[in-house]
């Protein structure tokens, strides 16, 4: 397809078939492609023999020790989109057909492993065996021939800065785009996407299956998105101006799919983001992931702008890295309130000691603002709750800081000069409650207890009262006192428990589960460590127990059954 002339130059090149012309692009950008030997990819891309709706067994990307039943819900070239049975489409993920994470149904049975429910299993865990039987009965299972051998790992890191490649856009994982190696660090490389803002770049291991040699898409039949036209294209010889439209070649279809300017239902997107990336018609079964960020257009009024100051001397808690916090700017903004809030919350994730841990503490919702977190080769994405006015910004920010155990003035509407009264007050309060146990370990346990209660709270941002938060804080300290008291040998007989489980202390919970099933008593230390009192116990689900308490499926099923029975007794009263 001919390209549209624009001014002195022209838009990015396409060949006569409508595919992106790498040869011309490399010549004009004076760049070299990374050699095939850099990649953990077969010289000849594997053939995709899967069919839609087939069942397989696959590693849960959010819990790499679990293998789950999955369904093929989409395909592009040699890649398939998978949905774990018992989960929803928000956790779909893509894999190459020669991935070591994929297995035919029956693999776990043959190897003595146990098929697990996915994290966030949508039903009661006690129903998992019957659900598993139902989901596999009569289902089409992918035959052995669909599963290909994974290629070997390159012996050394041969990537060099400036080399070109094709790479998966992890924020829009159905897309593969032209990219450049921006940096090399030991066994890792920094992938930057040509023509797009740095928000889409990422560090990854050199042998990541998300990296491909130049020409892989054309060879495999997978669409290659052209370089972005926002920011400065990485081209030296000619100046370029954005063309009116771009096209992406669809494999198996000689016609081209025009890129839409797609304004999603979630609202307008930033002019600095690739909000107009198109999706191949082959993804009809795999809806596009729309990249949405707050509107940053010049039409924003002054009353819709905010400035959030970073008070570097304030406490950042134990989840954030103080050295990274020190590197943050003195302020975010002034700018559109949604954009500024996103930058602040994303900076919290980026400054975390462990990104996924902080990411889990950030409240999710159905708003326009999207944040991400990296965990190994995985990039996780979530939306924040709707932020419709400036006052919502401050409510959400206050709640997020409280959840992360930070000083409420770390991010504030005014800069602090030197002394922070709130930090000094918290230091005095914590010293009053300090135990022989390390303070950091205590704060970590209370953070998990707080996350349990916050996740299942039905209160909106607007109606959460300070009174409730104060009561929760008092309760956490009471739970801590109970945990400390139980650290010594207690020969007293079991006390009579309250009829309302929400009133139970940590030791009451331990006592109850041990009386119901003596084998559960072995997990008492986990309940004490994470301060699971009655209120938190009644809010536990299988996801939380496996993720935070580290329990295996057997104990989780038993505890879930106990909780359900307690809830039934409470409702009958």
Image (cartoon, rainbow, N blue to C red):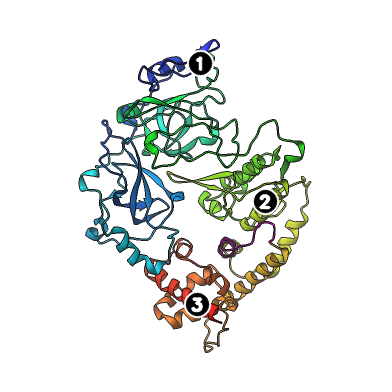
First to last magenta residue range: 446-463
Where is residue 156, by image quadrant?
Answer: top left
Q: How many marks?
A: 3
Residue 568's disc number: 3
Q: Percent position (x, y) of residue 552?
A: 39, 66
Question: In this orientation, which residue lies closer to the viewer: 344 or 190?
Answer: 344
Question: In this orientation, which residue lies closer to the viewer: 308 or 251?
Answer: 251
As measured in the structure, the alpha-carbon distance from the residue carrying label 3 to the one carrying label 2 is: 37 Å
Whether residue 63 is visible here, answered yes or no, is yes
- Per the image, label 2 sits on a secondary structure element best described as helix
Sooner in the amino-acid sequence: mark 1 or mark 2: 1
Residue that numbered label 2 is attached to: 397
Q: Percent position (x, y) of residue 567?
A: 51, 75
Labelled pair 3, 2 in contact (Cβ < 8 Å):
no
Whether residue 410 is visible here, answered yes or no, is no
Count neighbours of disc 2 (C-alpha within 10 A) and say few if under 14, some if 14 to 19, many if 20 or more.
many
Residue that numbered label 1 is attached to: 236
């Amino acid at each position: 397809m001919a390209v549209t002339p624009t001014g002195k130059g022209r838009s990015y090149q396409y060949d006569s078939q409508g595919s992106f012309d790498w040869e011309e692009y490399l010549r004009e950008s004076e760049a070299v492609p990374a050699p095939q030997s850099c990649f953990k990819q077969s010289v000849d891309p594997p053939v995709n023999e899967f069919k839609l709706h087939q069942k397989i067994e696959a590693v849960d990307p959010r819990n790499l020790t679990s293998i789950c039943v999955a369904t093929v819900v989409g395909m592009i070239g040699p890649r398939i989109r998978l949905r774990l049975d018992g989960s929803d489409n928000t956790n779909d993920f893509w894999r190459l057909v020669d991935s070591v994470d994929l297995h035919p149904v029956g693999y776990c049975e043959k190897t003595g492993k146990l098929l697990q429910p996915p994290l966030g299993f949508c039903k009661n865990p006690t129903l998992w065996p019957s659900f598993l039987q139902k989901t596999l009965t009569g289902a089409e299972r992918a035959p052995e021939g669909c599963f290909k051998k994974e290629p070997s790992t390159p012996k050394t890191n041969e990537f060099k800065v400036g080399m070109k490649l094709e790479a998966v856009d992890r924020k829009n994982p159905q897309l593969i785009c032209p990219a450049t190696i921006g940096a090399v660090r030991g066994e890792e490389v920094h992938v930057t996407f040509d023509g797009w803002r740095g928000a889409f770049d990422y560090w990854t291991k050199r042998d990541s299956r998300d990296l491909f040699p130049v020409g892989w898409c054309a060879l495999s039949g997978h669409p290659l998105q052209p370089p972005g036209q926002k920011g400065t294209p990485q081209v030296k010889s000619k100046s370029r101006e954005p063309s009116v439209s771009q096209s992406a070649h669809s494999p198996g279809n000689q016609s081209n799919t025009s890129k839409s300017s797609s304004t999603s239902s979630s609202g307008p997107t930033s002019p600095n983001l690739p909000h107009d990336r198109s999706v191949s018609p082959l993804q009809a079964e795999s809806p596009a992931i729309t990249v949405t960020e707050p509107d940053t257009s010049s039409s924003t009024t002054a009353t819709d702008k905010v400035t959030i100051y970073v008070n570097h001397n304030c406490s950042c808690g134990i989840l954030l890295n103080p050295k990274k916090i020190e590197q943050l700017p003195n302020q975010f903004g002034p700018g559109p309130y949604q954009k500024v809030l996103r930058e602040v919350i994303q900076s919290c994730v980026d400054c975390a000691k462990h990104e996924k841990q902080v990411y889990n503490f950030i409240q999710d919702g159905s708003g326009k603002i999207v944040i991400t977190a990296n965990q190994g080769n995985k990039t996780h994405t979530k939306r924040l709750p709707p932020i419709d006015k400036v006052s919502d910004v401050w409510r959400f920010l206050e709640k997020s800081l409280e959840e992360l155990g930070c000083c409420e003035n770390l991010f504030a509407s005014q800069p602090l000069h030197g002394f922070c009264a709130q930090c000094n007050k918290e230091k005095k309060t914590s010293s009053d409650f300090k135990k022989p146990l390390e303070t950091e370990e205590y704060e970590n346990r209370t953070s998990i207890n707080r996350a349990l209660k916050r996740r299942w709270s039905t209160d909106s941002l607007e109606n959460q009262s300070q009174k409730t938060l104060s009561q929760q804080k008092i309760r956490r300290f009471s739970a801590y006192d109970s945990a400390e008291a139980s650290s010594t040998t207690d020969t007293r007989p079991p006390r009579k428990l309250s009829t309302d489980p929400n009133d139970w202390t940590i030791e009451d919970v331990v006592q109850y589960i041990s009386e119901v099933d003596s084998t559960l008593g072995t997990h008492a230390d986990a309940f004490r460590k994470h301060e699971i009192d009655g209120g938190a116990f009644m809010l536990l689900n299988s996801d939380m127990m496996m993720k935070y308490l580290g329990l295996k499926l057997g104990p989780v099923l038993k505890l879930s059954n106990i909780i359900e029975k307690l809830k039934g007794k409470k409702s009958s009263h």
